[in-house]
């Protein structure tokens, strides 16, 4: 059981890294593929969805880590 949790944790951590790299600090997701330099005060569209998925994956990673810590 513990091995399965560790494998799931590794997969979730890779997804978290990929999502964080996709966000691009301050530049926005659109400029990563040659978009213009428009700046918005809030996240919109795919950037908002990416941020929410990232937060959910981080929470999932934390919960799985705690469960695997307490399982012998």
Image (cartoon, rainbow, N blue to C red):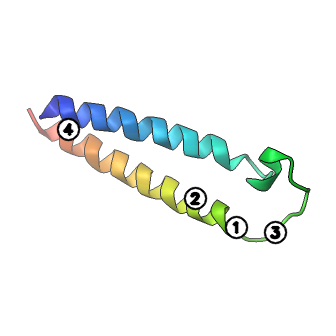
Please report contact status of discs 1 and 3: CB closer than 8 Å, yes or no.
yes
Please report contact status of discs 2 and 4: CB closer than 8 Å, yes or no.
no
Mark 3, residue position: 40
Using residue 39 as the reference point, say whether residue 25 is left or right of it: left
Q: Position of residue 20 (x, y in %)?
A: 60, 44
Indicate the quadrant containing the N terminus: top left, top right, bottom left or bottom right: top left
Whole-angstrom CA distance, mark 2 to mark 4, is 26 Å
Q: Position of residue 23 (x, y in %)?
A: 67, 49
Mark 4, residue position: 68
| N-terminal-most mark, 1 or 2 | 1
Please tell me which residue is depicted at 34% across the width and 47% down the height of the picture: 62
Please report contact status of discs 4 and 3: CB closer than 8 Å, yes or no.
no
Residue situated in front as seen by the camera: 6 or 46: 46
| N-terminal-most mark, 4 or 3 | 3
Q: Which mark is in front, 4 or 3?
A: 3
Please report contact status of discs 2 and 3: CB closer than 8 Å, yes or no.
no
Mark 1, residue position: 43
Position of 29 relative to 1 (above/below): below
Please tell me which residue is depicted at 47% across the width and 41% down the height of the picture: 15
Q: Position of residue 39 (x, y in %)?
A: 86, 64
| N-terminal-most mark, 2 or 4 | 2
Please report contact status of discs 1 and 2: CB closer than 8 Å, yes or no.
yes
- Tally of numbered tags: 4
Using residue 42 as the reference point, say whether residue 31 is left or right of it: right
Dot 3 falls on a residue whose secondary structure is loop
Question: Are there few (<14), some (14-19), or many (20+) residues within 10 Å of tag 3?
Answer: few
Mark carried by residue 1: none
Dot 4 falls on a residue whose secondary structure is helix
Mark 2, residue position: 51
């Amino acid at each position: 059981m513990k091995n399965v949790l560790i494998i799931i944790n590794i997969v979730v951590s890779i997804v978290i890294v990929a999502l964080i790299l996709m966000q691009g600090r301050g530049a926005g997701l659109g400029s990563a593929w040659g978009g213009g330099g428009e700046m918005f005060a809030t996240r919109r569209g795919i950037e908002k969805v990416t941020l929410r998925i990232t937060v959910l994956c981080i929470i999932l990673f934390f919960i799985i880590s705690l469960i695997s810590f307490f399982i012998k």
